[in-house]
Amino acid sequence: MIVGVLTLELFFPYARSLKDKRRILHGFKDRLHRHNVAVAEVDFQDLWQRSRLGIVTINSHAAIVEEILGRVLADARHLEEAEIAGHEIRYV
């Protein structure tokens, strides 16, 4: 069993309030569910231009876990209203 954890830090240059940030995150999280991952905002909940997300998937094959997290990262790179400030992938 392989657990893949993607920690993704996002910057929202155009957000002017927590409401703006939450609207963007809500849409992004909805899109990620098609990848069969669990998503949670794990840091910076009270900052309106930053967010750190924890994204987790599990499978018996490492290649599948790597592919899924790669697709999630690609989706994040295509966000128009947010920029990736950093990311880290770990396998357990």
Image (tube, rainbow, N blue to C red):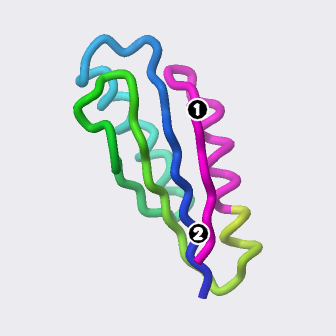
User: In the rendered image of this protein, does residue 62 appear above or below residue 18?
Assistant: below
Where residue 80 sits in the image (x, y, percent)? 56, 21
Q: How many marks?
A: 2
Instruction: Give the Cα separation between the discs numbered 2 and 1.
Output: 19 Å
User: In the rendered image of this protein, does residue 65 appear above or below residue 24?
Assistant: below
Q: For numbered disc 1, what is the local secondary structure? A: strand
Q: Which residue is mark 2?
A: 4
- Along the horizontal axis of the image, is 3 left or right of 64? left
Rate crowding at label 1 as few (under 14), some (14 to 19) or many (20 or more) other CA atoms within 10 Å.
some
Where residue 46 sits in the image (x, y, percent)? 23, 32
Rate crowding at label 2 as few (under 14), some (14 to 19) or many (20 or more) other CA atoms within 10 Å.
many
Comparing 87 with 70, the one in front is 87
- Along the horizontal axis of the image, is 2 left or right of 33? right
Residue drawn at the location 28% of the way across and 27% of the way down: 47
Q: Which residues are magenta?
A: 68-92
The reply to whether the C-beta atoms of the residues labelled 2 and 1 are less than 8 Å apart is no
Quarter-of-image position of residue 92: bottom right
Q: Which residue is mark 1?
A: 84
